[in-house]
Image: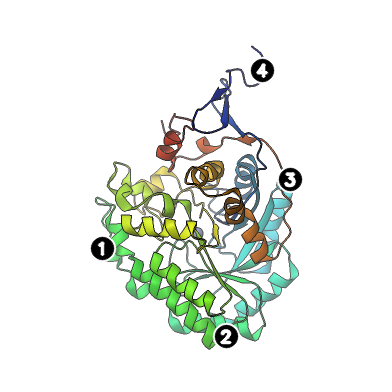
Amino acid sequence: MICQKYCIPCVKTSAISWILQKDSRCGTGLLVRENRNVMYIDSHVHFRDFNQKHKETIKHGLEVAYDSGLDAVFDMPNTDPPLMSRDLVIDRLKIARDSGIPVFYGIYMGLTGDPEQVKRAVKVYREFPQVIGMKLYAGHSVGNLGVTTEESQHTVYQALAEEGYDGVLAVHCEKESHLDPSLWNPVQPITHCYARPEKAEVESVRDQLRMSRENGYNGKLHIAHISSPRAVDLVVDAKNQGLDISCGICPHHFIYDWSQMYDDDGVLWKMNPPLREPNSREKIFQYLKDGKIDWIETDHAPHSLEEKTQNPYMSGIPGIAWWPLFEEFLRQQNFSDKQIEKLTFSNIVERFGIGIRKSRRKITDRRRDYPFDPYRKISEELGWLSKSIRN
Ligand SMILES: [Zn+2]
């Protein structure tokens, strides 16, 4: 009646100051938080594209990122084909540029156990400011970029040291010898958590600390999607001893524990590293609050429902469309404005040494773009849209 475009009257929840304006024609909502500068960086997303356009594309990912209040995203290299060469970097940067979406698109180069490839990757890093770092899969996850033997990981650190690489090396830490894929049984999704236990992460972090020291690695080490409090202890100790190290945590690891795996849709919660036991979740959330974890990253990794619920039961859940919710969650948990700003923006800018312009804009709800809404429960608790995306 008053608003031409968003024709249902605003609903202001009592718990939080979100205004929800619902567009009755398309069913999408517009969420605007009052008096806030919206600015987030997601340093860990999977925009796939190439041969996996059905999961996510660079253009679509950037659109959702823009609508969700993100000013920058850093894309992971376990694409198909994997991002290991200059030519593919150029292809991806062109797709992002052609999209015309004003969100900084950064990428990590994938590393292999071949020292010549590592050295070429360093050259590409130096050539393109959008190549913001390197990624090492010190354990197999999604894709074929695993550098799983100790020998090949040594080679990577050695080659980076020889090249004088001083950028960020983000590492997926799950030590292969502590993974037991035979335990996985899709009928009981919790078995995924047993197949990839905390010990695998802890031991891999220990390996990275040791190998980076032994090889005189002079760059910045970043432990991606840290999920075990014992691994955080190792990172904090190393930092106190002067190692240039950081770690990031995914919202799913500090909001949920592995009891999700017992839900009817438990199989949808399969991700690497997996959700952890309740005690670990509680402890790591306290660590986040205590400032022991450097920032939040979503590991946005959508798959089709078929891929999630049938063989190969892909690991990964979407994340970028829920950034405003994560902010609200932290606020409800008494994180200060300053803490939230550091965890979602400034610690990342500082670590990667890049200038990202903050922008102020309205947020458009894009959760319906994905087949699975992992944060539905928490949205309902916080008074967000009560309607499930899946229904
Ligand atoms: Zn990832």
CB-based contact (under 8 Å), mark 3 and mark 1: no
Q: Which mark is residue 100?
A: 3
Q: CA–CA distance between discs 4 and 2?
A: 61 Å
Give the percent coordinates (x, y) of residue 124.
70, 71
The residue under the point 51% across, 53% down is 298
Please tell me how crowded label 1 is: few (under 14), some (14-19), or many (20+) other residues with Cα within 10 Å: some
Q: Nearer the viewer, mark 1 or mark 4?
A: 4
**Chain-order first, disc 1 or disc 2:** 2
SS category of the residue bearing label 2:
helix
- Residue 176 placement (x, y as % from top left): 37, 73
Q: Quadrant of the C terminus?
A: top left
The answer to whether 167 is drawn above or below residue 383 in the figure is below
Query: Would you say residue 108 is visible in this rendering?
Result: yes
Decide which of tag 4 and tag 3 comes sooner along the chain: 4
Q: On the picture, is 253 further left or further right than 33?
A: left
Question: Distance of mark 4 from mark 3, alpha carbons?
Answer: 29 Å
On residue 3, the disc is 4
Q: Tell me, yes or no, whether the two marked residues, 1 and 2, touch with CB atoms within 8 Å.
A: no
Q: Which residue is mark 2?
A: 158
In which quadrant of the rendered view does residue 149 lie?
bottom left
Q: Is mark 3 within 8 Å of ligand 1?
A: no
* Viewer-nearest residue: 16 or 45: 16
